[in-house]
Amino acid sequence: MKIATFNINGIKARVNALSDWLDEAQPDVALLQEIKSVDEGFPREIFEDKGYNVETHGQKSFNGVAILSKLPLEDVRRGLPGDDSDEQARWIEATVVGDKQAIRVCGLYLPNGNPVELQDDGTPVPGGKYDYKLRWMDRLHARAQDLLADEMPALMAGDYNIIPQTEDARRPEAWVEDALFRPESRAAFRRILNLGFTEAFRARTQGPGHYSFWDYQAGCWNRDDGIRIDHFLLTPQCADLLLDCQIDKDVRGRDKPSDHVPVWVELDA
DNA sequence: ATGCCCAATCCAATTGGA
């Protein structure tokens, strides 16, 4: 079973690029972020015609996540638990029924968190964007604990907006004060990892120079000035099934690209 | 120190992204 994550930066602007990549990469499941569309505006027929089941959790203008799956989807849930007042569409999960195994698949678009606003005591300003990011990660931690307790193969994948290590940025010095790389953000990411998850890409590939995002500005792509912020976290039962994890870097160099590229895992499921 | 580029939107100039 091939499962991919792809922040497409707007479904309307990315229909062709996404379609071409799906035809070529042939993922069984694609977790999409930043569809920037309400559910009714998502061009589901284009993907249903390719054989995908389509489940969306959309929002006007910003955010929005979706699951495309050639395999049956069961028990679809929308929204990250833990705050009923949160109206941002950043989480969707479902059970994918594979030939050998069923996998609980969670697609996420973690808040960016900039600008970073701190109080005199160094804690984030309540209600600010950085505070929202860290509070969202508290809820993610709780959902992650519940997934582990279920003891079934499960994964959480998407745009984490977290640069885990120095080696995950071409110019780490440019990110030290940024919400994607600040100590609180990275610590929150590690607290989730350390519950017992496997970060799929780093389970397979070591060393610097592997990125999943290149800013549109300042010729970042041409200078290979990227960061690795799109991740797969696997429960132990899912990590047992891991066969491969790759970044489809070449997608960034095509016509009308997203600023992110697809990342995928192959599971023995 | 700032903008660069791109997408979406009450279609023009703003917001949000990372």
Image (cartoon, coloured by chain):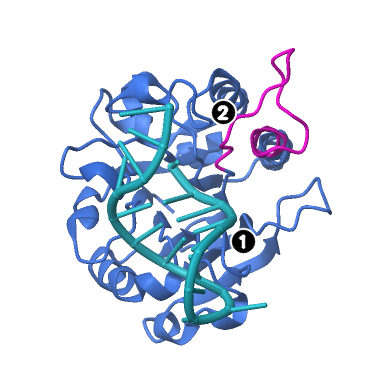
Other-residue count near label 1 (Cα within 10 Å), few / some / many at <14 / 14–19 / ≥20: many
Q: Main secondary structure of the magenta part?
A: loop
The three-letter code of the residue at mark 1 reads: Ala
The three-letter code of the residue at mark 2 reads: Phe
Report which colour depicts chain A: blue
Residue A259 image offset from top left, x and y in percent? 34, 52
What residue span does the magenta drawing correspond to?
A112-135
Q: Along the polypeptide, which appears first: circle 1 or circle 2?
A: 1
Give me the chain that's cyan.
B
Q: Residue at x 31, y 74 (%)?
A: A19
Look at the numbered disc 1 and give the secondary structure of its residue. strand
Left or right for A46, reference A257:
right
Residue A191 image offset from top left, x and y in percent? 62, 23
| Whole-number angstrom distance, CA of label 1 to CA of label 2 | 22 Å
Q: Is residue A107 visible?
A: no
Up-down relation of residue A46 to residue A60 (above or below): below
Residue A185 image offset from top left, x and y in percent? 57, 26
For mark 2, name the chain: A
Q: Pointer 1: what residue? A: A94
Relative depth, front residue between A236 and A246: A246
For mark 1, name the chain: A
Up-down relation of residue A267 to residue A184 (above or below): below
